[in-house]
Image (cartoon, rainbow, N blue to C red):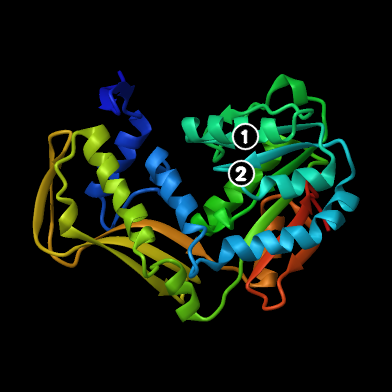
Amino acid sequence: MLKPEIEDGQVTLADPAFRNDVLRGFASRPRAIPARWFYDRRGSELFEAITDLPEYYPTRTETAILRACCADIARLAGAGRAVVEFGSGSSTKTPILLRAVDPSAYVPIDISGDFLRESSAGLASAFPGLPVLPVEADFLHPIALPAQVADTPKLGFFPGSTIGNMIPHSSVDLLRAMKASLGEGAMLVIGMDRIKDVGVLEAAYDDAQGVTAAFNRNLLERINRELGGTIPLDAFRHSAIWNDDRARIEMHLEATRDVAFTIERHPFEMAAGETIHTENSHKYGPRDARILLRAGGWTPVGEWTDPNGLFAVILAEAQPARHAP
């Protein structure tokens, strides 16, 4: 049974999957919580603020690439596809693609329902003749798309290098789930961040204004609010480090002192210096990206990058599986 919580004067229900992941994450060693739980309403708002920061190059770089390459994407994909966006958030990059490809419908998918409805309403207003069909769901699994687009060719849209938040085998599982949702013959526009100077990478995830730190610590606030936690927020600091062996930025919440707390009356203790691993952001070289896509059932058919090679946008096709060379 879902547990009632009160947020902004409204009774809500704690997500049992959130509860299970948090309790398991704090009990495990090393401690870790899946990054998808960042995105309650406040977390989604903070992430949108992160995308405007001067240190955070991915959003503005990918946006510039999309402006330059969407005509090519439209030529390769053809008109009339239903655009299906995975993890749509505020959909700030989506209008660039929609204006170029002449879609038959737009299906935004996001786990944050309130944010999804607001952004969908904005896009419906901006594109009055376009059917906008939001789906509140966890896109890590195959999704039943609206019946209105069941027989329509699909163009998936997965910008922001969100694929980098997953470890490689989970990324492959996600790509396969996307193929199952969209069907053979579908195409996918995906953003992938490139490996680059460590100083540039670490600054992008530990900005001078502390917005990323607030985004990270908001996870603890959510635990306290939704799961009756007693975590002292001032006992944890944000940490972002480059793991060269795994080609990823890791975000952690590090205890600055010995601390004890409860989550739904379950007791936990952490010593000073211990961390909760909250997010990975894997970076891919050109060949790595293509191998990952092929492992997930997608064949790259086009690739575009910025002049400095910071970021890549790739168009891939869901072709039938091959069982021999």
Whole-angstrom CA distance, mark 1 to mark 2, is: 9 Å
Residue flagged by tag 1: what amino acid is it? Answer: Gly
Q: Is residue 139 left or right of residue 156?
A: left
Q: Is residue 235 above or below residue 178?
A: below
Could you say which quadrant of the image residue 162 lies in? Answer: bottom right
Q: Nearer the viewer, residue 76 or 91?
A: 91
Residue picked out by circle 2 = 91
* x and y, in percent, of residue 19 in the image: 30, 35
Disc 1 crowd rating (10 Å Cα; few below 14, some 14-19, many 20+) is: few
Quadrant (top left/top right/bottom left/bottom right) for the C terminus = bottom right
Q: Is residue 255 above or below residue 44?
A: below
Disc 2 crowd rating (10 Å Cα; few below 14, some 14-19, many 20+) is: some
Q: Is residue 237 left or right of residue 139?
A: left
Contact? badges 1 and 2 (CB < 8 Å): yes
Is residue 36 something that shows in the picture?
no
Quadrant (top left/top right/bottom left/bottom right) for the N terminus = top left
Residue flagged by tag 2: what amino acid is it? Answer: Ser
Q: Nearer the viewer, residue 16 or 88?
A: 88
Residue under the point 87% across and 35% down: 80
Q: Is residue 244 above or below residue 78?
A: below
Residue picked out by circle 1 = 122
* x and y, in percent, of residue 63 in the image: 67, 59
Residue under the point 89% across and 40% down: 79
Return the mark for residue 16.
Answer: none
Q: How many marks?
A: 2
Q: Is residue 164 left or right of residue 44?
A: right
Could you say which quadrant of the image residue 134 lies in? Answer: top right
Q: Secondary structure at mark 2?
A: loop
Could you say which quadrant of the image residue 205 lies in? Answer: bottom left
* x and y, in percent, of residue 176 in the image: 65, 44
* x and y, in percent, of residue 285 in the image: 64, 72
